[in-house]
Image (tube, rainbow, N blue to C red):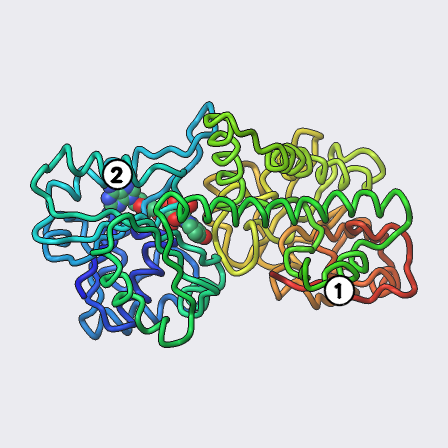
C-alpha cells in the first residue's frame, strides 16, 4: 500500500516508520523544512528509543521517504494519514484544529483516485464530519472516504506500543474503507491485536475518554497521596492494595507531581470544552483538570517546605525535566511549573536531564544546566527528583550528599526507600509516604 503521512512529529514519524516496517511504501510529509532535511540525512529530530534504527533500516530499504511536498505524496497514496498537532487553542482550551483543517484542504487538492483519508491526530468528536466537508467543498470530484483511527502510542515506548497495541480503533461511516484499513494493519491483526471497527464519532470519543480516564486515575491517587500524608498512611501500599483488584488494575496508580505531557493536559481540557458545547458537563474531568493544575505548583511549595520554608538565595538541584522518562518532550512537563514556583520564591535552579535539556531551553529560562545527576547536586540546598529516568534510580547517595550544601532530598516519584536515604544522612521527603514506614517496601514502577 502507498501511504502518505501528513505531519512527521512524535506520532507521524513513529507511525510512518512502523508502517514502512510492515512493508508498506510510506512518504512522511512535514511543513518544517529543517525537520525533513534532518530526516533525509538520517538524523532523528526527536528522542524516541529505537526510532533511529527503525527509520534508518526502512529508509535504506527504500520504503520510507521524507518530503515537504505534500501533493505528489498524496497523489500516489492509497491512504493518507493526518498526524498533525492539535494543541490547546490559546484562550479557551478547545483543541486547535487549524492544522488538521489546513491539511484536509491541501489533501483535497492533491488526491487522485480512490483514497482513504485517516485522522490519526487526536480530534474532538465530529471533526471527521468537518474534514469530510472541507474535502468535498475543496474538491467535489475527490473520491475520498474519511476515517478516524486515533493513536494510542506512548512516547518512550512508542514503537512497541505501535507494533503491539492493546487495540486498534477504526471509525468508519462507509464500508469501502474497511478493507483498506484491514490491509494496512494486517501484520498486527495476524499478531492478534484486536481491530475494532465502530462509528467515526465513537472512535473520536474513545481516544478522549481513554486519556481522560487515565488522567483521572492519576489524579485520584495523587489526592489519595495528600490524604495519606495527613493521616499517616502509605500511598504506595494503598495503590497496591487497590490495584490488585482486577477491576481497578495497578497501572497509572503511582502518586507523583501531577500529569503533564503532550496529551493528557490538552486532551482533558478539550474534552471538558466538548462537554460544555454539547450541554453535557463532564464534572469528573473538570475536577481532574483543576486538581492537576493546582498540584504542579503545590509541588514547588512542597520543595520550599522541605527547605525549611524559604528558598531565597538557595540552590535547588533538579533531576529530570521531561514530563516522563525516555522522551525529550517538554510539553506541559510538571517540571516547568515546579521550577517557576521555585524561581518566583527566589531560588537558583541547577538541573540535569538525560535527553530533555535542548527542549527545556525553549520553555524554561535562567537555569544552570548540569552535566549529570551529581553535578546537579553540586552546591545544592535541596535535590528534587522530578522525572524518574533509570539513571536516577540507583544514585550513589553518599556521593550525592558530598556534593550538596545541605542534604535535603525531595523524591516526587517515590523512587527511593526512606530508610535508605535517611541512612545516607539526608532529610528525605516523598509523596504520600509521610513517616518512616517499617512495612513499606513496594518499589515504584514506571508506567
Ligand atoms: N505525542 C504523543 O504521544 C501522542 C500520542 C497519541 C496521539 N497523539 C496525537 O497525535 C497528534 C500529533 O501529535 P505529535 O506529538 O506527533 O505532534 P508534533 O507537534 O510532534 O508533530 C506534528 C507535526 O505536524 C507538522 N504539521 C503541521 N501542519 C502540517 C501540514 N499542513 N502539513 C504537514 N505537516 C504539518 C508539524 O510541523 C509537526 O512536525 C496530536 O493530535 C496528538 O494529540 C500524540
Observer-nearest residue: 204 or 369?
A: 204
Q: Contact, CB < 8 Å: mark 2 with mark 1? A: no
Quadrant occupied by the C terminus: bottom right
The reply to whether the residue tagged 2 has its Cβ within 8 angstroms of ligand 1 is no
Tag count in the figure? 2
Locate residue 309: give its quadrant: top right
- The disc at residue 159 is none
Question: Where residue 264 sits in the image (x, y, percent)?
Answer: 53, 44
From the viewer's perspective, tell me whether residue 247 is left or right of residue 368: right
Task: Look at mark 2 in the image and give the residue it sits on.
Answer: 131
Left or right: where 67 falls relative to 49 = left
Along the viewing direction, whichever of 62 and 45 lies nearer the viewer? 62
Residue 32 visible to an observer of this rendering: no
| For residue 437, side relative to residue 368 (left or right) | right
Q: In this view, which residue lies farthest toward the top?
A: 91
The residue singled out by tag 1 in the image is: 399
The local crowd at label 1, few if under 14, some if 14 to 19, many if 20 or more residues have their Cα within 10 Å, is: few
Q: Residue shown at 27%/61% (left/top)?
A: 181
Q: Please name the residue shown 36% across and 47% down the image.
A: 121
The residue closer to the viewer here, 380 or 4, is: 4
Q: Position of residue 109 (x, y in %)?
A: 11, 41
Q: Secondary structure at mark 2?
A: helix
Q: Residues within 10 Å of mark 2 (few under 14, many from 20)?
A: many
Between residue 186 and residue 405, name the one nearer to us. Answer: 186
Label 2 to label 1: alpha-carbon separation: 57 Å
Position of 342 with respect to 13 (left or right) is: right
| Residue 400 image position (x, y, % from top left) | 74, 60
Asked if one can make out residue 173 in the rendered structure from this viewpoint, the answer is yes
Amino acid at each position: 500500500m502507498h501511504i502518505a503521512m501528513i505531519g512527521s512529529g512524535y506520532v507521524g514519524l513513529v507511525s510512518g516508520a512502523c508502517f514502512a516496517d510492515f512493508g508498506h511504501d510510506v512518504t512522511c510529509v512535514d511543513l518544517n523544512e529543517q525537520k525533513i532535511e534532518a530526516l533525509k540525512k538520517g538524523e532523528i529530530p526527536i528522542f524516541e528509543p529505537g526510532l533511529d534504527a527503525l527509520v534508518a533500516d526502512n529508509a535504506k530499504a527504500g520504503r520510507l521517504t521524507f518530503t515537504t511536498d505534500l501533493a505528489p505524496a498524496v497523489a500516489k497514496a492509497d491512504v493518507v494519514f493526518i498526524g498533525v498537532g492539535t494543541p490547546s487553542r490559546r484562550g479557551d482550551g478547545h483543541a486547535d484544529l487549524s492544522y488538521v483543517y489546513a491539511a484536509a484542504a491541501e489533501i483535497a487538492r492533491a488526491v487522485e483516485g480512490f483514497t482513504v483519508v485517516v485522522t490519526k491526530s487526536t480530534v474532538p468528536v465530529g471533526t471527521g464530519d468537518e474534514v469530510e466537508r472541507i474535502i468535498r467543498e475543496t474538491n467535489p470530484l475527490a473520491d475520498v472516504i474519511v476515517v478516524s483511527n486515533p493513536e494510542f502510542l506512548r512516547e518512550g515506548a512508542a514503537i512497541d506500543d505501535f507494533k503491539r497495541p492493546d487495540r486498534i480503533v477504526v471509525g468508519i461511516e462507509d464500508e469501502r474503507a474497511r478493507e483498506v484499513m484491514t490491509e494496512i494493519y494486517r501484520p498486527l491483526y495476524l499478531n492478534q491485536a484486536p481491530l475494532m471497527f465502530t462509528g467515526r464519532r465513537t472512535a473520536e470519543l474513545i481516544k478522549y475518554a481513554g486519556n481522560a480516564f487515565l488522567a483521572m486515575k492519576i489524579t485520584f491517587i495523587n489526592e489519595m497521596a495528600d490524604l495519606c500524608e495527613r493521616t499517616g498512611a502509605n500511598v504506595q501500599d494503598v495503590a497496591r492494595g487497590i490495584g490488585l483488584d482486577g477491576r481497578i488494575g495497578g497501572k497509572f496508580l503511582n502518586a507523583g507531581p501531577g500529569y503533564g505531557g503532550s496529551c493528557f493536559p490538552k486532551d482533558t481540557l478539550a474534552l471538558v470544552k466538548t462537554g460544555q458545547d454539547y450541554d453535557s458537563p463532564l464534572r469528573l474531568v473538570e475536577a481532574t483538570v483543576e486538581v492537576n493544575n493546582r498540584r504542579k505548583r503545590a509541588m514547588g511549595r512542597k520543595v520550599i517546605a522541605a527547605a525549611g520554608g524559604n528558598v531565597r538565595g538557595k540552590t535547588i538541584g533538579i533531576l529530570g525535566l521531561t514530563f516522563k522518562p525516555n522522551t525529550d518532550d517538554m510539553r506541559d512537563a510538571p517540571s516547568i511549573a515546579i521550577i517557576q514556583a521555585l524561581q518566583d520564591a527566589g531560588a537558583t535552579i541547577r538541573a540535569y536531564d538525560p535527553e530533555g535539556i535542548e527542549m527545556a531551553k525553549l520553555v524554561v529560562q535562567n537555569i544552570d544546566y548540569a552535566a549529570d545527576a551529581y553535578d546537579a547536586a553540586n552546591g545544592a540546598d535541596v535535590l528534587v527528583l522530578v522525572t524518574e529516568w533509570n539513571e536516577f534510580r540507583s544514585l550513589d547517595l553518599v556521593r550525592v550528599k558530598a556534593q550538596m550544601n545541605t542534604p535535603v532530598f525531595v523524591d516526587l516519584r517515590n523512587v527511593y526507600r526512606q530508610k535508605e536515604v535517611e541512612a545516607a544522612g539526608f532529610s528525605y521527603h516523598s509523596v504520600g509516604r509521610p513517616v518512616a514506614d517499617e512495612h513499606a517496601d513496594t518499589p515504584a514502577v514506571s508506567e
